[in-house]
Image: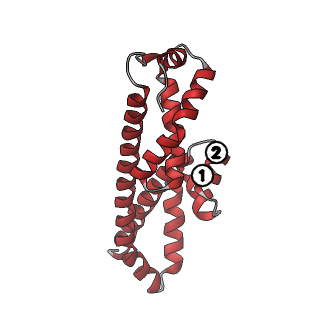
Amino acid sequence: MSVDREVVKSVKEGSVRAFELVYTAYVDRVYRFLYTLLRSGEDAREATQDVFVKLWDSREQLQEDRELAFYLFAICRNHALNILRKRKSQAGVAEEYQRDQPLMALSAEEGTEDTYSVLLEEAIETLPPRRKRIFELCKIQGLSYKQVASTLQISDGTVEVQVAKAMKQIRLYMVKQDVSRVCE
C-alpha cells in the first residue's frame, strides 16, 4: 500500500493523524518483514514499534518525492541487523559461561560449597549498583526481564544486556578468586 505525498508532507510537518495513517498502512508489512529477519514474534513486535518511533523521530528528514516504504524498510533492515549483532554477542557470552561451568561445579562438588557461596556473594557485591539491582531482581528474586524492565522503567534489552554483563563479571571474578585460593 502506497502512502501519497501529501500524507508524507503532513508527517514531515508533525501531523499525528497523518502518522497514524502511515502506521496503519505499513504496520503489518513492517512486522512481517522484521519477523522474517528476526524469527521471533516478540522481537518483531518490539522492533516494529521501534521502527515507527525512529520514523517519527526522523520525520523532518523525509523527502516527499521519495517512497516512504524506502525509509521504513531501511530503518527495519538496520534495526534488525543491530538486534542480530546483539544476539550474536550475547550468545558468545552465554557460551563462555557454559564452558566455564564445569570448573565451578567441580569446586562446589569437592566440599567447597560454602566457599562457593561466599565467592558468589563477593562477586555480586563487585557489580555496579544498577547492574547489581537488575541482576538481583532477575536471578535472585526470579523476575522476568519484562517485569524488571517495567519496575525500573528501562527497556527489556537494557535488562538483558545488564544481566549478561553481570554474569560475565561474576564468572570472571569467581574463576579468578577460585584459582587464587587454590594456589594458596
- Is residue 180 visible to the viewer in this orientation of the structure? yes
Give the colour scheme of this rendering: secondary structure
Tell me the tag on residue 82: none
Q: Residue 69, image x and y in percent?
A: 42, 31
| Amino acid type for the residue under numbered disc 1 | Arg
Mark 2, other Cα within 10 Å: few <14 / some 14–19 / many ≥20: few
- Tag on residue 133? 1
Q: 105 left or right of 150?
A: left
Q: Identify the residue at image location x=51%, y=41%.
A: 48
Tell me the amino acid under the disc marked 2. Leu
Is 81 rendered above or below residue 4?
below
State yes or no: discs 1 and 2 in contact (Cβ < 8 Å): yes
Compared with 18, 175 (above or below) is: below
In front here: 168 or 54? 54
Circle 2 residue: 152
Q: Nearer the viewer, residue 60 or 115?
A: 60
Of labels 1 and 2, earlier in sequence is: 1
In the image, 113 versus 166, the foreground residue is 166
Q: Residue 167 location in percent, x, y?
A: 46, 60
